[in-house]
Image (cartoon, helix red, strand yellow):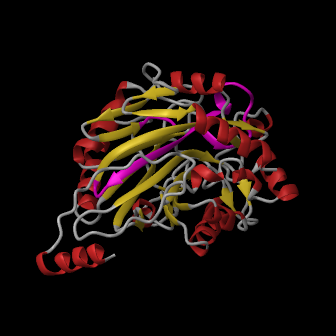
Amino acid sequence: MAAFWFFVALLSAGGALWLMQPTRIAPLAAVPAPAPTPDRHRSTVSFVGDVMLGGGVAEVARRRGTDTLFARVDPWLHAGDAVVGNLECVLSTRGAPTASKPEAALRAHREWLLRGSPEDAAALARANFAAMTLANNHSMDYRGVAMDDSLAALHGAGIASTGAGDDLTRAQSPAIFERAGIRFAVLGVSEILPQGSWATRGRSGVAPGRGLARTSLDPAFDGAMARRVRAWRDRVDVVVVYEHWGTELVGKPTDDQRAFAHAMIDAGAQLVVGAHPHVLGPIENYRGGVIAYSLGNFVFDAYPGAAARSAILQVRFDGARVAGWEAVPVVITGGIPHAADERSARAIARALEVGPTCHDGLRMPGACVTTEGTRRAALHHSAHAD
């Protein structure tokens, strides 16, 4: 004990020299709050794909409670400091169906109207969601009044939002949150734009993820987004671009998507996340940043197969630097995500374009998807979550 107090006195007199070494965080372990330092902080933030609280999922939530939807993956969602996802529905009881999705298309299941409850926002907060993007093709399913209700529900639960608003400026504003002294800005945009769903200077809607004169990404839009990224990088530590894009059931990115993602990292973003295809796409390391081209579904009415495979992308930050990442493989049954078995985990690894296996799990660039011990623990938790 005397030696301890001598050490404390020595620190007070002469200052301290800390050797900062990144620590590996097991997916199921609770992450202790790191002690703040004058110039460096560490945080882990998880990213997921489409969170859809309507349809059959809404019926599950009504019968068993919305918390049930996240119970089987709760240890992973709380292993880090925050979770970010795409809210693929409105949280509202109001609003008339949008005219951009005709009745004939709805009957033929070519289009969908997705609606959850405002009360679901509290369950999202309990599941550790800090921010949601509403930049997608469903945030205007029941017009501006339902979108406003969604925003009010999220903000009332303490969840930041991006990608939708009462005008273009508000829709383009990022979701800002802070964890462990690191300030994050999430910029949500959508390439998938039903007629009349995009925000303008005088109209509510979603933030466009492409030039409105085109149906896909283009260099002019890439340049405009790069300027937004640079502007926000000067004001926060970490910038994340969350783009709703691509073709349903196609996980492989196009050349335009790769060019856009690379341009965002080049401009200063540390992470680019994609959604909308409903299946997983590759994860790429690029110039110190991470690109997840599609994280697929997360909570969703999903048929068996590729659309029922998902992943939780856990990214570790050391200050503004990406220190590493892991992808936790999950599958969706009855709308509810839970731990993947070994066969599904390997299919997920292939969709993420994983490299060779490591000593006791599946390996992707720089990290194992999951270790066998962690997988067994997660399966045990899933089996007893109900």
Q: Residue at x 38, y 66 (%)?
A: 180
The spot of residue 187 in percent (x, y) is 40, 55
Q: Give above or below for 386 relative to 307.
A: below
Q: Could one spot residue 220 in this view of the protein? A: no
Q: In this picture, which residue range is highlighted in magenta?
A: 292-320
Magenta stretch: includes residue 305: yes
> Which residue is rendered at x = 26% and y = 66% of the image?
235
Taking the image as shown, residue 173 lies to the left or right of residue 37, namely right
Say which residue appears at 50% left-offset and 35% top-offset: 294
Q: Is residue 33 visible?
A: yes
The x and y percentages for residue 49 are 56, 44
263 left or right of 179? left
**Frontmost residue, 258 versus 200:** 258
* Residue occupying image coordinates x 56% and y 72%: 158
Residue 17 is a magenta residue? no
Does residue 306 appear left or right of residue 351 in this picture? right
The residue lying toward the viewer, choosing from 349 and 144, is 349
Quadrant assignment, res 366 = top left
Q: How many marks?
A: 0
Which residue of the protein is positioned furthest toward the right in this rendering?
63
Q: Residue furthest front?
A: 2
* Quadrant occupied by the N terminus: bottom left
Q: x and y percent of residue 313 in the render?
A: 49, 42
Q: In terms of image quadrants, where is residue 18?
A: bottom left
